[in-house]
Amino acid sequence: MKSIFAIARTLIKEVFRMRMLMFFLLLVFLGATVVFAWWLSGGTGRPEEKIQTFISYSTRFITAVLSLVTIFISIATVSRDIKRREIFTIATKPVSRFGYLVGKFLGVTILNIGFLIIIGTLIYGTARVMVKTEVRGTPDEIAYDKGRINALVLTARKGVFPEKPENREEIAREHAKRLLNEQLMRTPELKNNPQFVESLGEKLYNDALKSLKANTVTVPPGRIRVFRFRDIKVRPGDDRVFLRYKMDVSFNTESLKMYGEWWVGPKDPTQERSIRFSSYDTIRKYHEIDIPVEANGTSLISPEGDFYVAFRNPFENMGSSAIFTEGTGLELLYTADVFETNILRGMFLILLRLVYLTILSLAFACCLSFPVAVLVVLVVYLLGVASSFILDAVDSDAHESVGEVIRFIMMPIPHLAAYEPAILLEKGRMVGYDLIGKCLLYMILVKGGILTGLGFLLFQRKELARVVV
Amino acid sequence: MAKLDNSSVISTVGLTKIFRDFWGRQRVIAVDKLDLEIRPKEVFGLLGPNGSGKSTTIKMLLGLLNPSRGWARVLGKSPGDVKTNARIGYLPEESFLYPFLNARETLDFYGRLFGLDNDRRKNRIDSLLDMVGLSGATRRQVGEFSKGMQRRIGLAQALINDPDLLILDEPTSGMDPIGTRQIKDLIAELGKRGKTILLCSHLMADVEDVCDRICILYGGKIRAEGQLDELLARTEQTRIECEKLDDHVIAEIKTVIAKHHPEYDLKFETPRDRMEDYFLQTVEKAQLEDVATSGARIGGEVSDFLGSQSEDAGESVIESLVSLESEKAKIAPAGVELDTAEVSSVDEPKAAADFISSLTSESKEDMTVAIEQQEQAVEEPAENDTKVVDTDIINNLLGSNNKNKNDGDK
């Protein structure tokens, strides 16, 4: 272990002695936080929006810069050792090649932890200072704005989607089966073509499932639909939850706005209505309603953590149905943790991304020259960042065989966009342990582990003093 | 084909390295079927012109290159074995060191790679820096060092683990005469302390001064191999060195020799100091006058920890057993198949020549006599510690020679 730490320690020294790099990073860190916040303070907009913008852009920018720095350092440290032959005096010491790579990995990771502690502190400190400098007006206005900032941005809210109806897939399958049988009875010659029958069955199933899903999220005019949220665990002392929604419509209203009537409570509010309120909001845009946790001395959330929301689509909407798309249309948010630990988890999520990039970079640096390795890792990184977009495009547009090829290529590439903490932090969303665990498992252990194994195998067999003539 | 010999520190059988181009086509045979054996506590010189395969051989022995064919064993294990590396010190042909570390940090880094504890590491670093003459430049970054200074710190890193096997690739390249002499002295001293040293060089003077046995490579093949003294001995000549002789003594010697060998062409001349010695004397003088320098100084004594048992008294029993085995192997190689002839334990003519050399080494004015003869027979003097030589001794020696010759004639 001593030798591994020696390699890590030397790498850290090396980076600290790259004075221009350190100076550049210092400028970037300060520019992305203090200077950016100062620049934002001159603009218009509500204080919480400014702080959201600050957290979003500074976190994204720093993540991108640290990713590039990680790629550069990780590849450079191995490539230069090989190119300048310093590896000769290291590989001939009692340290295995795997130990050498682990030492390099450890050094880069320790550096990244240091950078993230600095940048996390700067982002947190600047955001707190912004609360003081951006909130102005009468004491009531100040209290209101601070309340909004603390409730919407500088917090860690957990989001819960409505419970999906049970056995939806089973119902769809039964329905598709019945339809298929009817079709086969009408045209029995189809049985001679089992492939066609199979694809027809699949199509009928997908249509049925789609229809069922639409049915559960659509509220026709004059109808009420009840949504159940489960496992709501509001912390003691918290007095509000937030209903976040985006309403789509079957056809546009004249004003591009929709009326709505809401009931919320611990049981089915259509049976036992606890609180009622109305809304009139622009369609296809997110809106948030604060809902008190208690009303008239009783909790609106059941002891089991159940919370019901009922929505009525009034006739004033001129016959247009309200649609709450599954996964995005309706969400209940509640404070699950404080901002301080949330930003810590956010930084940890960034660290996991940097760890993956370190592994990737070291693996490629073992077998490729510096510029080629940098190019390859950058391509993988950019594909990872754009993975959601690429896969969505493949699902909707690409030819099936092309889609299969692209999906296969994308298989080892991590979906970095899915593990982007800036999206969560800017909205005061909790960076959940489940997300961290998923990232750790898929991105680091599975994909990183495979890369580590391949990189090590190549490096183990590599002739460090190889001459190509 | 020769067999791999586990009693050897290094042994290779049919070791071959072929360098190929990008497409895998054979381009250069750098090392060709090399059978080599280096025994424990031997200073072995690997010689050859540029491109003869010396460095390639070393890199294969260290696991930095994979052999295309053949086998190699280093300290009984395959090249590159991590545990074996703990017993090896390696100085590459250039001191490939991190330029951003200073001298002390460099040694600290390598000390840590060997897992040395803090106290031992610090002691060794101080000692080595002093030994290689860099104690005045400990805080300077290695990247700022001259090539010679880099070689010095490179040598220090190769010694930080007190290695059993020291592999030195062109150790004196880029070094000033002070450093060159110091490294040669160091190699000789380490050899005396029981280290096995593989010295790779194309500087004949370096090898001649320190090596017990050499191997000359050309085109990746062994062209000559054997004991240095055996290879270089000019058995058809006798050379006598002594303090300055008067003309009449010279005339008398000529008469004596002419009486026995009238056909011999005698040459009497006043020897010159070697340039290296003269240079060193000048620098030593400057040092005594305390002239300031930011470069390397003349190094101190060879570090005590190198080859000493006291510092490592607590080291593992296994290591002591290994060294014991190595010792046994050298003394009694019974049952071991060796590829080359054994070194004879007593070499009388060499001992006599060494004695004469020791008698005259401190003389300021020497006289060299070179005599062509058929046989050489110099009797070993009784008093080995005698340092003063006068004409009587020469006469006695000559008399002994005559006597021996006469005895031989009888």
Image (tube, grey):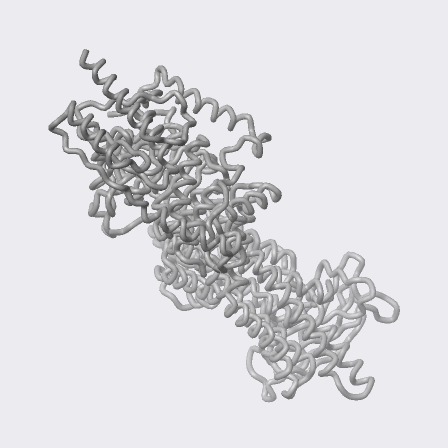
Q: Position of residue A173 (x, y in %)?
A: 52, 54
Q: Position of residue A369 (x, y in %)?
A: 36, 58
Residue at image location 21% in from the left, 27% down from the top: B235
Which quarter of the figure has residue B358? top left
Q: Position of residue A319 (x, y in %)?
A: 61, 81
Position of B215 with respect to A4 (left or right) is left
Residue situated furthest right in the rendering: A297
Position of A243 with respect to A303 (left or right) is left
Residue at image location 32% in from the left, 23% down from the top: B343
**Rendered-image quadrant of the N terminus of chain A:** top right
Residue situated furthest front in the rendering: B248
Q: Looking at the picture, tell me which residue is in the foreground, B280 or A284.
A: B280
Which quarter of the figure has residue A404? bottom left
> Is residue B298 shown above or below A377?
above
Position of A212 with respect to B81 (left or right) is right
Position of A218 with respect to B101 (left or right) is right
> Is residue A310 shown above or below A143?
above
Residue at image location 34% in from the left, 35% down from the top: B211
> Is residue B336 shown above or below A294?
above
Q: Position of residue A305 (x, y in %)?
A: 76, 59
Q: Looking at the picture, tell me which residue is in the foreground, A52 or B323.
A: B323
Q: Looking at the picture, tell me which residue is in the foreground, B232 or A87.
A: B232
Residue situated furthest left in the rendering: B263
Q: Looking at the picture, tell me which residue is in the foreground, B225 or A454.
A: B225
Total numbered circles? 0
User: Is residue A311 in view?
Assistant: no
